[in-house]
Image (tube, helix red, strand yellow):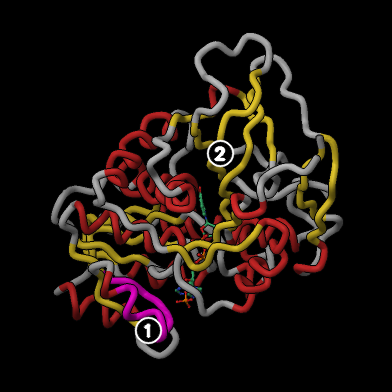
Amino acid sequence: MKHRRIIVTKAGGPEVLQVIEEELPEPTAGQVRVKVLAAGVSAYDVMVRSSRLLPPKPPFTPGVDIVGVVDKLGEGVADLEPGQRVAALLGFGNGGYAEYVCVPSEGLVPVSPQLDPAEVVCLIANYLTAHRVMYETAVIENGERILVQGAAGGVGSAILELGRLANLEMVGTASKHNHTIVESLGGTPIDYRSENVVARVREITGGGTDAAFDHIGGFRQLLRSYRSLRKGGRLVWYGVAATKTYGIRIIPYSILTMLLLRLIPDGRKALFASDESEHTQRALPELLDLLSEGKLRPVIAERIPLTEARRAHDLIERGGYAGKFVLTTESEGGGIS
Ligand SMILES: NC(=O)c1ccc[n+]([C@@H]2O[C@H](COP(=O)([O-])OP(=O)(O)OC[C@H]3O[C@@H](n4cnc5c(N)ncnc54)[C@H](OP(=O)(O)O)[C@@H]3O)[C@@H](O)[C@H]2O)c1
């Protein structure tokens, strides 16, 4: 039997994403073959697709998160059964933009079949990242004040949703057209394009926030986030969305900026996002429970058929969306004979 998979043929625009047809992959010892129901699309996928310098090297399949059904067990896998619904955070290059993917069994987390696969896929990279930077890096406490940069995006909206559950007082930067969504998630919006972010944050929070979450990067942006903090506040830098405007040279500048900020003895902290390590296995079941209880409602920008992955990348590059794009295979009936 054959299946479809999307590959990045070379570094470039959305047109370098191509649909190929190939034999189903066979799970090796310790792996599980998963029939994909939903695959997440992220700003990160767009960045690695377009860069000649960042790994992995083409041809590769993008996509770091999937929800699917166990299809075949590799040798030695005893704790899962065919037909079981699972979620996984994937390794780089062995991506989720495919109808079938083989995954090490220890990377799979069981998921209730009652849950919407597209909503569950939002939890994997976005909510896990949000949870990690909030609770492992910034060690947020109930009732604190936070600044969420890029608050309408996939991870930004997840921070707002989790922050609302912890009764945080939240301020979120976003383009004007995304302010309604920031408000609906419990944040006070600031238009980063036209307003003085630092002055507005200080005004709204009465002197600054206890934490700031920044996935934009770059010298001026990180400085703005840092200056929005009150004494004792923590800045967490966890992404480089600014590569969209400035290219990947923004990455070393951002690292250098963070290292310099760490030298300032003013009681504020500049923190790099903590390592993923065992966080997924620990936190995903907790997030799945919150989704089952109706306490989380992930923002889905659009559900797009897998074979139209190029359109999803095109939409991300144009901007103007909120939440996460999800590739779906269900309506297409999975693999092809
Ligand atoms: N460290 C990790 O483990 C980890 C994990 C996941 C993601 N990330 C990183 O996090 C970043 C975001 O990922 P995502 O999937 O959430 O992206 P996304 O959904 O595309 O969101 C990006 C958001 O950034 C906003 N934005 C752009 N420039 C801005 C600026 N100067 N100030 C404030 N907001 C700005 C946009 O807001 P408007 O549309 O409102 O203008 C957009 O909503 C990526 O760089 C990704 O690599 C890191």
Compared across the picture, whether 158 is left or right of 187 comes to: right
Image coordinates of residue 103 in percent, x first then y, are: 64, 29
Residue 256 in view in this figure: no
Image coordinates of residue 271 in percent, x first then y, are: 40, 50
The span from disc 2 to disc 1 (Cα, nearest Å) is 38 Å
User: Alpha-carbon neighbours of circle 1 within 10 Å: few (<14), some, or many (≥20)?
Assistant: some
Given residues 262 and 238, the one toward you in this image is 238
Which residue is at 69% across, 38% downward? 100
Given residues 321 and 20, the one toward you in this image is 20
Any magenta on residue 175? yes
User: Alpha-carbon neighbours of circle 2 within 10 Å: few (<14), some, or many (≥20)?
Assistant: many
Q: Amino acid at mark 2?
A: Gly
Given residues 81 and 12, the one toward you in this image is 81
Residue under circle 1? 191
In the rendered structure, find residue 78 and report the number of the disc placed on it: none
Compared across the picture, whether 258 is left or right of 243 comes to: left
| Label 2: element kind | strand
Residue under circle 2? 68
Q: Which residues are magenta?
A: 171-182
Which image quarter: residue 188?
bottom left
Residue 226 in view in this figure: yes
Q: Amino acid at mark 1?
A: Asp
Sequence-first tag of 2 and 1: 2
Any magenta on residue 8? no
Compared across the picture, whether 52 is left or right of 270 comes to: right
